[in-house]
Amino acid sequence: MDREYNFAFFDEGSKREIRRAVLKAVSIPGYQVPFGSREMPIARGWGTGGLQITLACIGPEDVLKVIDQGSDESVNAVSIKKFIKATTGIKETIYTDEATIIQSRHRIPEVKLREDQLMVLQVPLPEPLRNFEESEAKTKQMHANQDYTGAWLLLFEQIMKYGNISTGADHTIRVNDRYISVPSPIPKYDNPKLNFCPALILLGAGREKKIHAIPPYTKVESIDFEDMPFKTEDFSHKKCELCGSSGVFMDEIIKEDGEVVYRCNDTSFCKSIREKR
């Protein structure tokens, strides 16, 4: 393929530097590894961290899937796919089971991931302690001392204010019984998918210049209290209007006549179910 850029945009030195950070993150599950975040042809905050990981890890034989909040056709997903395609020439797919690398913003696919797949999540704010401590030096010390009182205090404040844990997305997790971490702004419904997931999960924050990881088959727990356990959104009694699926994360749709219906948030999953009929 005749390309104007080096394969996957970056020079080989940049790829090696990012891969070293990835290897350290995999070796210390949940630990935030600083890395030299590169300037990208997309704005920071639009997935540059995840994109840099994908470009550093991708190979000519890989098959790519990119999703944004469950959709393969959103502006963010399409733009990232076009850029990766233009600098690599690799194959793309909308189907999770066909992909070897899946880059995502705000969702983990409904189809169970495999050992031979890499899941890359885009992360806006990688530090779970930032809500109550602005100093980077102090948050590092708190992680070293496992001083995570503030994270549970935030949950306690939600319970006192709303009567329950009201986190809608980006619910803090504890990885391998050690570091607390952010799962990226995925809905609470997706948090259990991280626990002992067969695939390697890499999380990149370009603006904050951090990479952290959840290695395959790693214990991941969503923080909670014994008397107020973590709960996900419940869609068990809802059915997708299009494919009839239940027990998956759904969007609530209000039609013009006021009727409320539900549809699979993962559009490729919904499409694959309809195609099997």
Image (cartoon, rainbow, N blue to C red):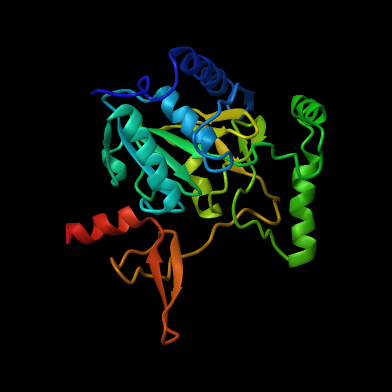
| 223 is higher (above) or lower (below) than 245 | above
Q: How many badges with numbers are in the image?
A: 0
Q: For residue 65, what is the image quadrant?
A: top left
Q: Residue at x 63, y 32 (%)?
A: 177
Q: Residue at x 45, y 85 (%)?
A: 258
Q: Split into 4 quadrants, where in the image is the C terminus?
A: bottom left
Can residue 198 be spotted in the picture? no
Residue 274 x %, y %: 23, 61
Q: Is residue 250 left or right of residue 59?
A: right
Residue 262 x %, y %: 41, 71
List the single residue furthest toward the front. Answer: 4
Q: Nearer the viewer, residue 112 or 123?
A: 123
Q: Is residue 175 left or right of residue 114?
A: right
Q: Is residue 69 left or right of residue 207?
A: left
Residue 210 x %, y %: 62, 29
Q: Split into 4 quadrants, where in the image is the N terminus?
A: top left
Residue 42 x %, y %: 51, 38
Can residue 211 be spotted in the picture? yes
Q: Nearer the viewer, residue 86 or 141?
A: 86
Q: Nearer the viewer, residue 195 or 200?
A: 200
Q: Is residue 145 left or right of residue 44?
A: right
Q: Residue at x 76, y 26 (%)?
A: 140
List the single residue furthest toward the bottom. Answer: 257
Q: Residue at x 56, y 53 (%)?
A: 188
